[in-house]
């Protein structure tokens, strides 16, 4: 396996705020939703009501120090590993208790807005994994296109080149270049035209070894 030479961190830690994490010089921060500084114990109760409007969440987002965070990320060349899908899915999971579901939904609304803003401000965004390492990235890619304003090509770069940069292995993988490791996926339909075409996998090449996805 590859050895990461970079520093990675959640966007918010119990002992460090999002701004402190960014200014510590980490290579990437994970979970855009965590820029709120909230956890399940300190989300304001008024944010846990069901059916809150987009304008409500827009106003909540404006109360957070997002401009300062973006400025710090630009200065430190911090990559955003958005990983907001985990909060969206928990926020719509009927098997979870109401308070946990509403807390996850609130976190998703903030994370989505921060991801959109970071993208608009030129912050590199990658697509990490979370609980589901097999399918999470594909679903996160589609979410960034369909709800966060990324073009398919932008998010494909995020999943490959930016992902390699986030964990410090861009010299050996992440782009198709002579001398880099042959890790490739060949599809039968173009995902740059329709991101749902990600599902049409024909061939996988991992470390130069060929795998037929249909066998």
Image (tube, rainbow, N blue to C red):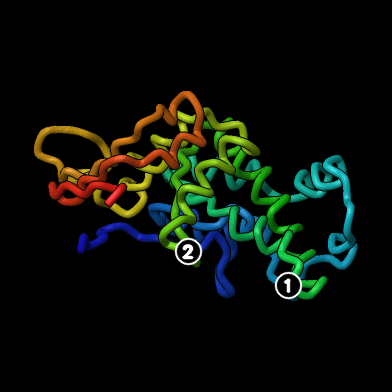
Q: Which residue is at a point 40% across and 38% down the rendered structure image?
A: 200
Q: Residues within 10 Å of mark 1 (few under 14, many from 20)?
A: few
In the displayed structure, 149 sits above or below 17; it is: above
Place of residue 161 in the rendered image (x, y in percent of width and height, measured from the top left): 33, 39
Q: Toward the viewer: 141 or 198?
A: 198
Task: Name the quadrant containing residue 133.
Answer: bottom left
Place of residue 83 in the rendered image (x, y in percent of width and height, measured from the top left): 54, 54
Q: Residues within 10 Å of mark 2 (few under 14, many from 20)?
A: few
62 horizontally vs 15: left or right: right
Q: Which residue is at a point 37% across and 47% down the rendered structure image?
A: 163
Place of residue 9 in the rendered image (x, y in percent of width and height, measured from the top left): 45, 63
In the picture, the disc for residue 132 is: 2
Place of residue 50 in the rendered image (x, y in percent of width and height, measured from the top left): 88, 59
Q: Element under label 2?
A: loop
Residue for badge 1: 95
In the displayed structure, 202 sits above or below 25; it is: above
In the displayed structure, 81 sits above or below 203; it is: below
97 horizontally vs 89: left or right: right
């Amino acid at each position: 396996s590859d050895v990461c030479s970079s520093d990675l961190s959640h966007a918010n830690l119990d002992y460090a705020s999002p701004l402190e994490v960014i200014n510590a010089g980490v290579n990437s921060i994970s979970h855009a939703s965590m820029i709120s500084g909230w956890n399940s114990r300190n989300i304001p109760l008024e944010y846990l009501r069901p059916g809150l409007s987009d304008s409500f969440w827009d106003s909540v987002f404006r109360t957070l120090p997002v401009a300062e965070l973006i400025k710090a990320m630009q200065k430190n060349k911090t990559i955003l590993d958005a990983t907001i899908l985990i909060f969206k899915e928990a926020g719509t999971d009927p098997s979870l208790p109401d308070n946990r579901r509403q807390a996850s939904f609130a976190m998703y609304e903030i994370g989505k807005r921060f991801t959109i803003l970071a993208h608009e401000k030129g912050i590199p965004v990658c697509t990490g994994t979370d609980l589901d390492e097999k399918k999470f990235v594909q679903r996160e890619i589609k979410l960034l296109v369909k709800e966060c304003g990324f073009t398919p090509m932008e998010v494909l770069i995020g999943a490959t080149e930016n992902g390699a940069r986030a964990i410090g292995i861009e010299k050996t993988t992440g782009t198709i270049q002579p001398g880099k490791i042959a890790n490739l996926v060949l599809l039968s339909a173009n995902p740059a035209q329709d991101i749902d075409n990600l599902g049409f996998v024909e061939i996988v090449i991992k470390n130069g070894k060929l795998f037929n996805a249909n066998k």
